[in-house]
Amino acid sequence: MCAVHESRRKSRHPVARGSTRPTSRDVAQAAGVSQAAVSLVLGDKWRGRVSETTAERVREAARELGYRPNLAARNLRLGRTRTVLLVVPALTTEFFAGVYTGAARVAAERGFGVVLYPSPEGVGPARDPFASAQAALDGVIASSMAADALTAIRGDQLPLVMLDSDPEGSLGAATVNLDITDGTHQIADHLLGLGHRHFLHLAADIPSWTFEVRARALAERLAAVPGTSLRTAHTPMSIEGALAATESALAAPGPHHPTAVVCDDDKLAAGVYKALRRRGLRIPDDVSVTGVDDIALAAALDPELTTVRLDAELFGERGMQALLTVLDGRTPDAGDIPVELVVRASTAPPSTP
């Protein structure tokens, strides 16, 4: 700290020794600003109202004085609990753990807490658990769920942001989505560019908008190229389910043997690996395989999996930012989050018959 600043700070009245806690008035006096400015800065509403230099001076004064705002009183004035509910399909996946991490990080920066609720396979929870909890929530973020399944949670009152959900069927809620259509197009273009024409789509057997988008985008992209064929096999979201579905699909009669398997998820790709090896087929020499997510498993498979990288933490961050924007009475930014194809060793040109 410079000498001039130190001298200026010493000239102000310190908090009396033995006082219970510093107040916003103490912070204002120490920073040389009004109490209104302190309220704006510590309430994270200072942008466009006070300068960055002033905001930093207020934060520094609050840190040095050990000031902690009276959240209970502030929330009572604002009519808020500063608590958000995050609903995800399951807690057992690395992807949704990343969504929670990103959402919680942004929430903490604004002084919000996050309550996490898993709703397996996107099925809406019963009404009773949330009947008394609505008053303790400021808003809801829900991932991969139908809007009408959320009425038990939010009623008609709580602000809602939907992740991985149909913008046309969101019942007026804000939506934040990954550009999964583009991701599917990237996979199709990569495999077509390698020379593949006969495909098996291992599709997640879950009634979800995101998986419907993937199936539609893949079918449309392949149909635009003459001489292609597409077979679809539905599977539960498990390695064992993918193994069984792939074995059945490969054993089914048909004019063309698929040279590429497009999976809705990296975990499903692991089941495909097992099924192909049981049939004596090599990856990628005989069959190329792709996934979606780019979780740690993708690089652990042998050969490493070509997949679409979805930034789960950024997804959670954007979802929480959208909800906080709604709570501030503003409209969230539009636009899907870009995704990236990560090409690894599981894809190659098809072998010559």
Image (cartoon, grey):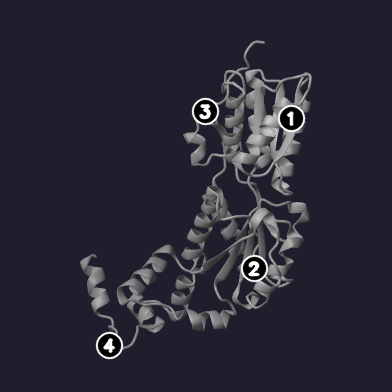
Residue corresponding to mark 2: 329
**In this image, 344 relative to 135: left or right?**
left
Checking the image for residue 16, the label placed there is 4
For marks 3 and 1 on the same chain, the one whose residue lies earlier in the sequence: 1
Closest to the camera, between mark 3 and mark 1, is: 3
Residue corresponding to mark 1: 221
User: Which percent across, then down, holds residue 93?
Assistant: 55, 49
Closest to the camera, between mark 2 and mark 1, is: 1
Residue corresponding to mark 3: 344
State the SS at label 4.
loop
In the image, 207 versus 333, the foreground residue is: 207
User: Which percent across, then down, holds residue 271?
Assistant: 60, 35
For marks 1 and 4 on the same chain, the one whose residue lies earlier in the sequence: 4
For marks 3 and 2 on the same chain, the one whose residue lies earlier in the sequence: 2
The answer to which quarter of the image holds residue 53 is bottom left
In the image, 225 versus 58, the foreground residue is: 225
**In the image, residue 98 above or below residue 35:** above
**How far apart are the two marked residues, 4 and 2, measured between alpha carbons?**
40 Å
Q: What residue sits 61% from the left and 32% below the top?
A: 272
The amino acid type found where label 4 is placed reads Ala
For marks 4 and 2 on the same chain, the one whose residue lies earlier in the sequence: 4
Q: How crowded is mark 1: few (under 14 residues within 10 Å), some or many (20 or more)?
A: some
